[in-house]
Image (tube, grey):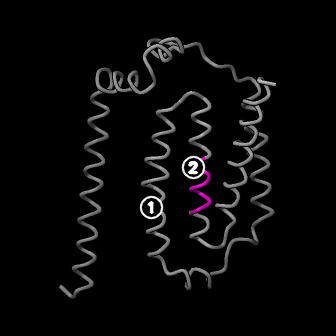
Amino acid sequence: MEALLPKAIFVYLAAALVITSILVVTNKNAVHAVLWMLVMFLHQAVLFITLDAEFLAAVQIIVYAGAVLVLFLFVVYMINLRTELKIKNFTVFWPAALFVSVALLILASQALKDFRTPSPVGDMSPAAIAKVGHAKLLGQALFTEHILSFEAVGVLLLVAVLGAVVLTRRIRMRGEGV
């Protein structure tokens, strides 16, 4: 009985992820689609917890369910949905989309047929992760071996934020007639 519980939890989470993903894509109401995406993100975080990846679960909730979802809600409220609904949608292409989806599913199954998990290399072995912890080991790797990459990503994010501020300011200045 105890062996069936983790499998049942995984099956529930996997089914919930697939169903909510489909609801996100097929929902005609954009706000409802974003709310279904929130449900999907929360289920994905629980799936990370069942895989003993607590740090990824926390990042999933903080970054995706927090920041990205709020960004999507702002975009949904900023676009003009009345004009979007008048535009013809792409539902006439569903046979081609179904064909491409089946082809990609066949390709993915063929690629995964011979998949083997690699043996752990270096400090990232399961024993080291269990001993030290995910977050601590990731922090040590980021701030020692990969410090240059970490700093480069920080600079890129800073440039992106500054670019967004400059572009927003120019659009506002043009709208005011300046």
Q: Where is residue 61 in the image (x, y as percent from the top left)?
A: 49, 46
Query: Within 10 Å of the Cα at label 2, are there few (<14), some (14-19), or many (20+) other Cα atoms?
Result: many
Q: Is residue 29 magenta?
A: no
Q: Which of 82 and 152 is in front in this view?
A: 82
Magenta span: chief secondary structure: helix
| Badge number at residue 41 | 2
Q: Is residue 60 above or below residue 98?
A: above
Quarter of the picture containing the N terminus is top right
The stretch in magenta equals 35-42
Q: Where is residue 45 in the image (x, y as percent from the top left)?
A: 56, 42
Residue at 68% over, 19% down: 116
| Badge number at residue 25 | none
Query: How far apart in space, not on screen, are marks 2 and 1 (Cα)?
Result: 13 Å
Q: In this view, does 166 lie above or below 145?
A: below
Q: Tell me the SS state at disc 1.
A: helix
Q: In this view, does 50 lie above or below 68?
A: above
Quarter of the picture containing the C terminus is bottom left
Q: In this view, does 49 lie to the left or right of 26?
A: left
Q: Disc 1 marks which residue?
A: 70
Q: Tell me the SS state at disc 2.
A: helix
Q: Which of 44 and 80 is in front in this view?
A: 44
Residue type, label 1? Val
Residue at the far left: name it. 178
Residue type, label 2? Phe
